[in-house]
Amino acid sequence: MRKTEALEKLTDRDKKHLWHPLTQHKVSPDMLGIARAEGALIFDEDGKDYVDGIASWYTCMYGHCNPYILKKVSEQMQRLDQVVFSGFTHEPAVKLSEELIKILPENQEKLFFSDNGSTATEVGIKMALQYHHNQGEKRNVLLAFEEGFHGDTFGAMSVSGLSVYNGPFADFFIEVERIPVPTETNIHQILTFLERRLEHNNIAGFIYEPLVQGAAAMKMHDVDGLDKILGLLKEHGILLIADEVMTGFGKTGKYFASDYLDTQPDIMCLSKALTAGLVPMGLTTCTQEVYMAFYSDDVAKGLFHGHTYTANPLACAAALAALELLQTEEIQTGIQNTIQWHQKFDEEIKHHPKVASTRQLGVIYALDLNIKMERYGNLRNQLFKHFMDQGVFLRPLGETIYILAPFITTKEQMERIYGAIKSALELV
Ligand SMILES: *Cc1c(COP(=O)(O)O)cnc(C)c1O
């Protein structure tokens, strides 16, 4: 290391060569240097700690550097690091398929690996399009919810309704039609619209974030309404693609948001907490029926999609360890405790004059402020800074403040988050 590097802070060295995601560098030049993380805490390079109130984008649900997951992955690392998954298979992938199938919705039978949430939805979209193509049916349109978010690759971007940043690419998207999320008042209208629309049925699949739209600021919708939409679409042979990249693995209080619904998806997309924040991996699961549309003597009917790191053994080992933890009493108790703490906190603040509305599903809690804010505006940045000063990492989305902390967050750490939110309400 050169002497200047040792003296300079990460924040300064970062500026020379690095380009960060979702960042306009001219407006936001400073990145905070993070030195380490443990449990629900992250530590910056000066040693100050922050409660990770969003589990680093909903990944590290069992805590950062979880010792059990680290142990399992380091054991795996010394046995088999990486091998091609085309023509070969290995224990971590096989075992993960056996274990995951036990908790997935009953109709899910096959697992297809990729690298992250965007590729998981990309694969789901390709499965749906090719499913109809393989059967000689021309269905070239996808249906999606307004304000949905499904990732940043082209297919995923196309179906995402949150398009503020997609402008330069919009001319290159695949064909997508959108419906609003169901509420008690609009559900009848949505169903009537769909019935008419489906008289000409060229829709291959419907992609949806079940019950909670993460990037739309934890917007929640109605179980009953969603069930009705899914039921109708299923009758018309439209493949249901549940994007559970955010909602999966216990966050909603059940293993999957789809577990709240009667109509099960044909295809599911998983990532984020799948590997507990240790390494990236995506999974697209499907029913036997979807799989059979690709099963043929004709090679061209196969799904010709593959990433170099498909089913990386270390990622599979992390996912297996995470899955084991998810089913332990300790984690399940953590989930129940968090649900109750949030409910109590909600009672305290929901009538505050600065709070417009609140919502909760499982360990996901969100409140809307009574103030209009820009997604990356000044007040939002002030709020963010206030939270960081209080030792709490939260990322307000527009006028929404949400909590999605690791399942292992202690009462004391959660109180730090609540306290920072309460003092923020006095600030705005
Ligand atoms: C984060 C997210 C994605 C994209 O996942 P990446 O790993 O960031 O590519 C897709 N869908 C949903 C619902 C997400 O929350």
Image (spheres, rainbow, N blue to C red):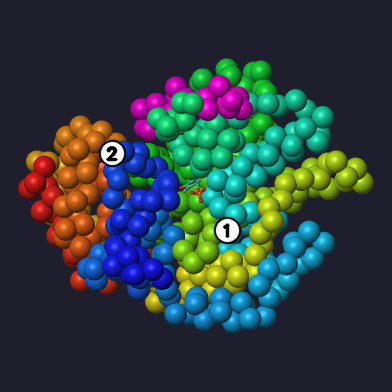
Label drawn at residue 27:
2
Q: Residue 149: image x %, image y %?
A: 46, 39
Q: Secondary structure at mark 2?
A: loop
Counting residues from the N terminus, which is met first, the one under dot 2 or under dot 1? 2
> Is residue 105 positioned above or below 74 on the image?
above
* Mark 1 residue type: Met
Could you say which is closer to the camera, residue 372 or residue 186?
372
Instruction: Determine the CA span between mark 2 and mark 1.
Output: 32 Å
Residue drawn at (46%, 26%) of the image: 167
State the residue lying farthest toward the front: 3
The magenta region covers 169-190
Label drawn at residue 281:
1
Is disc 2 surrounded by few (<14), some (14 to 19) or many (20+) residues within 10 Å?
A: few
Left or right: residue 283 versus residue 390 is right
Label drawn at residue 410:
none
Residue drawn at (76%, 67%) of the image: 89
